[in-house]
Amino acid sequence: MTTTDLPPPTDPATTGHDGLPDVLVTPPWSRRREPVVVPGLTRSAPLASDGTPGADALHAVPDLVALSREMVTETTLRLLPFTGPELADLMMELRVKSRSAWTRDLARQWLSRHPAAAARDLVPPALEEPGPRRELAEHALLALATDGHRDLVLTAADNYGSAAGAAIRAMLDTDPLELLPSTLPKIPRWVGVPTLPTIRLRDGVRTLPVESARHVVTMLSLSQPALPYAGLEIVKDVCDPVSLAAFGRALLLRWVDANCPSVGRWALDMQGLIGDDETARRLSPLIRSWPGHGDHTRAARGLDVLTAIGTDVALMHIQGVADKASKHSTRRLAKERLETLARDTGLTLEQLADRLVPDLGLDTDGSLSLDYGPRRFVVGFDEHLMPFVTDAAGTRRAALPRPGVKDDPVAAPAAYQRFLGLKKDVRTVAADQIRRLERALADQRRWSGAEFHRYLVGHPLLWHVARRLLWVTSEGPDGGEACFRVAEDRTYADVEDEPIVVTATATVWLAHPLRLGDRLAAWAEVFADYEVLQPFAQLGRDVHVLTDDERTAHSLDRQDGRTVHVGRLLGLVRRGWRMGKVGDGGMLCTLERDLPGGLVASIDLDPGMFIGDVTAEQQQTLGNVWLPTHADGKLVPGFGAIDPVAVSELIHDLQEVTSSTSST
């Protein structure tokens, strides 16, 4: 910050040239003033605890502070009961600079928990020579004042003398627009402001002049994800969000073309503040590609941006990276973001995934009407969630026709672009959701009846898949389990087409053919009669039963000696498998899959995959699938003790991977 002796706060709505806000015409950095420095202030308060039961001893705090600076979130949590200058310095930094939303929140909790101690220890750095440390302290004091602790802050400042009290009082009264760093960032050459896309105002008619667009770039470069410059809110209020997002995307792509210089990293970070769904679509492939060039940190920041955008489409792309990125490290980063979201909402990852499926703007019946003026079309979806259109006569078309001369010149192009955007989003989400439901079949995942109604049958997109599958409810008409299908009108029917009720308290899961027995043929006939095509093999799924010898064995040799391409092996990760432990030389020589009862099945690979480049060894020879002989100190009886569906799916996965492969 460079100004404290200023006039009263200005009204952000104050307008300048052509009705634009002043911050877009004569921004504060055009009238800089020197900051007030009060030297020689010392902090003498010792480390202290608020007496929370079970808190760490005081002597452990310095080590915990050091660990927290390495972004160990759990360590930050353990520091909440303590106060002192070291804690104030740490928390003022973490609340802004930590890439973990949880850690930032913990730092804010610390401020709220210890406002008097925090104010006492933040005043001296807030009045030292200009620099990053002073800026962090100033913003932390402002946060305390905004949260209702202004008097505590002023009292703490007055305790350091009248000069300190006057300087802090002036700082608290400063217009937020005047809160600037000691050194303004320079706009890099690669930005090329005059050639960036034009930003429209919300009236849809006027556009920002080039010089005002330059001021927008300066505001973006002044901002941090957790601490945006105050003027950006004004920009977002007066500018059309679609054109502002397009402006931001152009900055991002120019930064990428300039080889992603660190001094312009704000061009990536700020997409979280001004980006939209199209930004998420453009950013997702970049995130997947960056680790291949050694840019893991950049990929992590990109995932933070998707999290900050926060729309259904953006979160869908995080899920896509977690499921499909080629690099294990990238998938892990995305999964960490999802785990944080799940933890914050008290959900499992599977429950969170249900809630992250975007509705893509579809109507509640799962369709979308497109108005060309004199012509209208309705979008539907097939068993693979691929969109198609029907015209007013009910004729089905694989693609939407381009607008013609007789169509509405405004509505028709907008509807056509809407369909193109829908196709892009469906292409991203369709295969992932079908794969997720197939995995739910393999894992015999359970939903509550309420979840089933809301997130599957009630979802505009997923209901197209749900109605093509066979389900089981725990509360059938006779009090036991009962199979049912979802009818066209979203009611439920049994094999005789009699209505069946699925209560909100029931448990619902996908029917596995191994458990259907004699009912399988009858249900297959029902689906055939209604010409229902399934999104994946369910009723026609291959099932695998252990031999008597295999039931007592701890290893299966059905795939032993098979040679497969590494790409097919990596496909197992999407089916619930994971890489085993890293061995000597950085080699991954096993793949693992969780089984019921806390057991883990492993399959050996030869020569294995190098952790730095899992595709370096293109051909991998499979060994036996094996179980440990003991788990948690208990004897494991063998594969026969495991749920038959889990064993069938384990063999099914490997059979799919090894089909059309050779033996060594």
Image: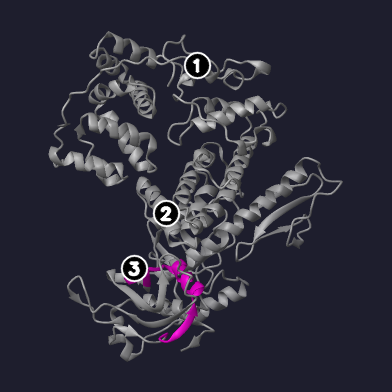
- Residue 415 makes an appearance in the image: yes
Residue type at the position of mark 3: Val
Q: Nearer the viewer, mark 3 or mark 1?
A: 1
Q: Are marks 3 and 1 in contact (CB under 8 Å)?
A: no
Q: Nearer the viewer, residue 100 or 28?
A: 28
Q: Specify which label sits upstream in the sequence, 3 or 2.
A: 2
Q: Residue at x 64, y 32 (%)?
A: 240
For disc 3, the neighbor class at 10 Å (few under 14, some 14 to 19, many from 20) is some
Q: Which residues are magenta?
A: 559-588
- Residue 366 makes an appearance in the image: no
Direction from residue 369 to residue 570 in the image, left or right: left
* Residue at disc 2, secondary structure: helix
* Residue at disc 1, secondary structure: loop
Q: Specify which label sits upstream in the sequence, 3 or 1.
A: 1
Q: From what the image shows, is residue 330 above or below residue 153? A: below
Alpha-carbon distance for marks 3 and 2? Answer: 18 Å
Q: Residue at x 28, y 69 (%)?
A: 598
Residue type at the position of mark 1: Arg
Alpha-carbon distance for marks 2 and 1? Answer: 41 Å
Q: Specify which label sits upstream in the sequence, 2 or 1.
A: 1
Residue 565 is covered by the magenta coloring: yes
Q: Identify residue for label 3.
A: 582
Q: Nearer the viewer, residue 510 or 341?
A: 341
Direction from residue 472 to residue 237 in the image, left or right: right
Q: Identify residue for label 2.
A: 333
Q: Nearer the viewer, mark 3 or mark 2?
A: 3
